[in-house]
Amino acid sequence: SWAEFMQLFAEFGKLTDKKPEEEAVQKQVKKVQDYITEHFYKCTNEILQGLGKMYAANGEFKENIDRAGGEGCAQFVSEAIAVYCR
Protein backbone atom coordinates (compact mmCIF):
# COMPACT_ATOMS: atom_id res chain seq x y z
CA SER A 1 0.00 0.00 0.00
CA TRP A 2 0.98 3.65 -0.38
CA ALA A 3 1.05 4.06 3.43
CA GLU A 4 3.45 1.09 3.75
CA PHE A 5 5.65 2.53 1.02
CA MET A 6 5.73 5.95 2.73
CA GLN A 7 6.64 4.22 6.00
CA LEU A 8 9.94 3.21 4.35
CA PHE A 9 10.70 6.90 3.87
CA ALA A 10 9.70 7.68 7.46
CA GLU A 11 12.36 5.12 8.45
CA PHE A 12 14.81 6.92 6.14
CA GLY A 13 14.03 10.11 8.04
CA LYS A 14 15.54 8.55 11.17
CA LEU A 15 18.79 7.91 9.28
CA THR A 16 19.47 11.40 7.92
CA ASP A 17 22.14 12.02 10.58
CA LYS A 18 24.24 9.28 8.93
CA LYS A 19 26.22 9.35 5.71
CA PRO A 20 24.43 7.99 2.59
CA GLU A 21 27.08 5.26 2.18
CA GLU A 22 26.67 3.86 5.73
CA GLU A 23 25.41 0.28 5.97
CA ALA A 24 22.12 1.09 7.74
CA VAL A 25 21.26 3.63 5.03
CA GLN A 26 22.20 1.27 2.21
CA LYS A 27 20.06 -1.48 3.78
CA GLN A 28 17.14 0.94 3.73
CA VAL A 29 17.70 1.59 0.01
CA LYS A 30 17.56 -2.18 -0.54
CA LYS A 31 14.25 -2.30 1.38
CA VAL A 32 12.80 0.34 -0.94
CA GLN A 33 14.05 -1.53 -4.02
CA ASP A 34 12.64 -4.83 -2.74
CA TYR A 35 9.29 -3.23 -1.87
CA ILE A 36 8.93 -1.75 -5.35
CA THR A 37 9.83 -5.11 -6.94
CA GLU A 38 7.39 -6.99 -4.73
CA HIS A 39 4.42 -4.61 -5.05
CA PHE A 40 4.80 -2.66 -8.31
CA TYR A 41 7.36 -3.85 -10.89
CA LYS A 42 10.87 -5.31 -11.11
CA CYS A 43 13.05 -2.51 -9.81
CA THR A 44 16.51 -2.92 -11.33
CA ASN A 45 19.41 -0.72 -10.17
CA GLU A 46 18.98 1.27 -13.38
CA ILE A 47 15.30 1.93 -12.63
CA LEU A 48 16.12 2.67 -8.98
CA GLN A 49 18.73 5.22 -10.06
CA GLY A 50 16.11 7.02 -12.16
CA LEU A 51 13.66 6.97 -9.26
CA GLY A 52 16.32 8.42 -6.97
CA LYS A 53 16.76 11.41 -9.26
CA MET A 54 13.00 11.82 -9.49
CA TYR A 55 12.58 11.69 -5.70
CA ALA A 56 14.90 14.70 -5.25
CA ALA A 57 13.37 16.76 -8.07
CA ASN A 58 10.70 19.18 -6.99
CA GLY A 59 7.21 17.80 -7.18
CA GLU A 60 4.85 15.37 -5.60
CA PHE A 61 7.43 12.68 -4.83
CA LYS A 62 9.70 15.12 -3.03
CA GLU A 63 6.79 16.60 -1.06
CA ASN A 64 5.48 13.17 -0.02
CA ILE A 65 8.92 11.84 0.96
CA ASP A 66 9.77 14.98 2.94
CA ARG A 67 6.34 14.79 4.62
CA ALA A 68 7.06 11.18 5.62
CA GLY A 69 10.71 11.53 6.58
CA GLY A 70 11.20 15.21 7.35
CA GLU A 71 12.60 18.17 5.44
CA GLY A 72 15.54 17.13 3.23
CA CYS A 73 14.71 13.42 3.36
CA ALA A 74 14.04 13.15 -0.39
CA GLN A 75 17.46 14.62 -1.19
CA PHE A 76 19.09 12.24 1.31
CA VAL A 77 17.28 9.23 -0.20
CA SER A 78 18.38 10.34 -3.66
CA GLU A 79 22.03 10.52 -2.55
CA ALA A 80 21.79 7.13 -0.82
CA ILE A 81 20.31 5.57 -3.96
CA ALA A 82 23.10 7.06 -6.10
CA VAL A 83 25.68 5.40 -3.79
CA TYR A 84 23.76 2.11 -3.89
CA CYS A 85 23.64 2.06 -7.69
CA ARG A 86 27.33 2.89 -8.26
Image: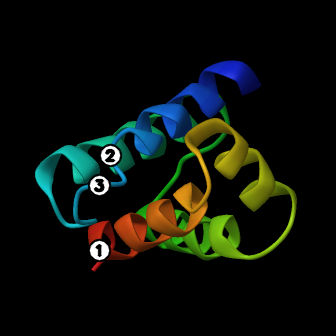
Is residue 1 in sight in this rendering?
Answer: no
Q: Earlier in the sequence, mark 2 or mark 1?
A: 2
Eye-nearest disc, 3 or 1: 3
Circles 3 and 2: CB distance less than 8 Å? yes
Q: Position of residue 1 (x, y in %)?
A: 72, 19
Assess disc 2: are there few (<14), some (14-19) or many (≥20) residues with their C-alpha within 10 Å of its C-alpha.
some
Task: Give amino acid for label 3.
Answer: Asp
Q: What's under tag 1, amino acid-wise?
A: Val
Q: Is residue 21 above or below residue 8?
A: below
Tell me which residue sits at (29%, 66%) in the image.
84
Tag nearer the camera, 2 or 1: 2
**Which residue carries the number 3 mark?**
17
| Quarter the C terminus occupies | bottom left
- How packed mark 1 is, by other alpha carbons closer than 10 Å (few <14, some 14-19, many 20 or more), is some
* Callout 3 secondary element: loop
Label 2 element class: loop
Are dots 3 and 1 in contact, CB under 8 Å?
Answer: no
Could you say where residue 70 lies in the image, as x and y percent from the top left?
Answer: 59, 46
Q: Earlier in the sequence, mark 3 or mark 1?
A: 3
Q: Position of residue 22 (x, y in %)?
A: 15, 58
Who's the residue at 62% across and 56% down the image? 71
Of tags 3 and 2, the one toward the viewer is 3
**From the viewer's perspective, is residue 16 above or below residue 5?**
below
Query: Could you tell whether 59 is left or right of 66 in the image?
Result: right
Determine which quarter of the picture holds residue 75: bottom right
Asked if residue 13 can be seen in this view, the reply is yes
- Amino acid type at image mark 2: Leu
In this figure, which residue is indicated by the disc labeled 1?
Answer: 83
> Marks 3 and 1, Cα distance to the nearest angstrom?
16 Å
Horizontally, residue 74 falls left or right of residue 32, namely right
Look at mark 2 in the image and give the residue it sits on: 15
- Estimate the spatial distance between the alpha carbons at disc 3 and disc 2, rounded to whole Å: 5 Å
